[in-house]
Amino acid sequence: MTAPAVLTVRGKPVAEVLGSFGKAVPGSVHLSLAPSGGRWCSRSCPHLPANGGKCYAERTERFRIALGDRLAAFDAAGPEPVAARAFAESAIRGHRFPWARVSAFGGVPEDPADVPSLVRLVRAWLDAGTPVHFPAETQRKADRWTRAIGRPEFEVRESVADPRRFVRAVRHRLRGVFSTVAGDPGDSRPERLRKAREVAERARALGDRVIVCPAVASRILRGSAGSAKCGACRACSDRDIRGVVFPLH
Ligand code: SF4
């Protein structure tokens, strides 16, 4: 087993590699291994800055300098030592959390064999009853990680950049769970919500369970600019929900 990483950011030791994330209920955790748009993000992603795309997570990291520095330090340490450290931190808390998310920022390596501690960590979370949202940006990566984790109740959720491809995936692929983002930057927020509902409607035509993210939807309906909150929803972690559509936010 790899020794957990000793990490510093600007000369100060990192207290915990497990972070919290704004959308989730208090006590939830996330593990991100590298910056968004970084070396683990698929080169095929149309939002990749290197492809001229506008990855909104990458922009967030540029504005939140402490977050960007932290992710750069994790990247330099390498994914396996960081995941080993996360496993040790999680074990102290019995691996039990209201909600856990992998890759709130950045991605994971293509091959799960390169990060055995992350495989172990996700299994430990699931065994402890922690709901896990683990997105991946390609079908191949989602399938490889789902197989490596090997729990029948769990699937890595494929983020499909193009809503039309998302509709086809839900309707025609025999297995897999998916998410997408609907709406364009020039659209008003209600228009983004209308488009998200339309995409969900088309995808569920064959009876699959497809939802529009209730956190983003309710924020739009309230006309609020504050952050969206999942509350009791765990749809992203639920393999019975074939598709989640996020209005662009
Ligand atoms: S679908 Fe549910 S779990 Fe996923 S982000 Fe939206 S509110 Fe949270």
Image (cartoon, grey):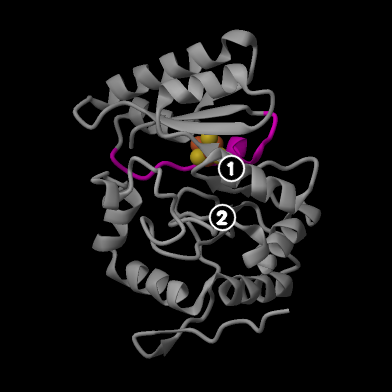
> Residue 96's x, y, as percent?
72, 60
**Label 2 residue SS:** loop
Residue contact at pointers 2 and 1, CB within 8 angstroms: yes
**Residue at horizontal 28 percent and vertical 20 percent from the top:** 191
SS majority, magenta: loop
- Residue bounds of the magenta highlight: 225-240
Q: Position of residue 177 (x, y in %)?
A: 62, 32
Residue 232 visible, this orientation:
no
* Residue 110 tag number: 2
Question: Viewed as shown, does residue 207 lie left or right of 110?
Answer: right
Some atom of ligand 1 lies within 8 Å of the CB belonging to the residue at label 2: no
What amino acid is found at the position of numbered circle 1 in the picture? Arg
Q: Quadrant of residue 100?
A: bottom right
Q: Which residue is mark 1?
A: 140
Most distant residue in the top direction: 205
Residue at 47%, 34% (x, y): give it. Answer: 160
Tell me where residue 74 appears, x and y as whole percent: 46, 74
- The image shows residue 248, relative to residue 45, as above or below, that is above
Farthest left residue? 186
Horizontally, residue 43 falls left or right of residue 114, namely left
Above or below: residue 160 compared with residue 206: below
Q: Using the image, determine if residue 34 lies above or below residue 200.
A: below
Q: Nearer the viewer, residue 8 or 172?
A: 172
Residue type beneath disc 2: Glu
Label 1 beta carbon within 8 A of ligand 1: no
Residue at the (55%, 24%) spot, across then down = 169
Please check the rendered image and state whether residue 71 is part of the magenta-colored stretch, yes or no. Answer: no
